[in-house]
Image (cartoon, helix red, strand yellow):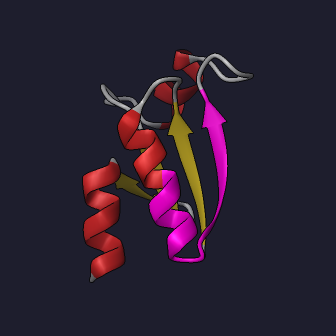
Amino acid sequence: MKAIVWSKDNCTYCDQAKKLLESNGVDFEEKKIGHGYTLEDLLAVVPNARTAPQIFLDEDYVGGFTELKQKLES
């Protein structure tokens, strides 16, 4: 399993999502807005994104931290 985490600076939920992935042994690529990626890049992939993080697992869109936590617990 591999994840992509769209994140931003000073984002508690982004940090929690990355820690959750690490604790579950899931490799992830972080795409941080303002560090090589723009908001427009994110919106091209998730047009209705209004919050961070935005997470994909194995190329399937999951949502944010809460949805990630629910998916990993199921």
Residue under the image location 31 percent in, 30 percent down: 48
Q: Nearer the viewer, residue 63 or 26?
A: 26
Q: Which residues are magenta?
A: 18-32
Does residue 36 appear left or right of residue 32 in this picture?
right
Q: Position of residue 9 (x, y in %)?
A: 53, 23
| Relative vertical location of residue 16 with respect to residue 3 in this rendering, above or below | above
Q: Position of residue 50 (x, y in %)?
A: 30, 25
Does residue 54 appear left or right of residue 32 in this picture?
left
Does residue 46 appear left or right of residue 59 in this picture?
left
Residue 70, quarter of the rendered image? bottom left
Residue 56 seen in the current view: yes
Does residue 61 appear left or right of residue 2 in this picture?
left
Q: Position of residue 47 (x, y in %)?
A: 39, 29
Residue 60 seen in the current view: no
Q: Nearer the viewer, residue 46 or 37?
A: 37
Residue under the image location 57 percent in, 66 percent down: 22
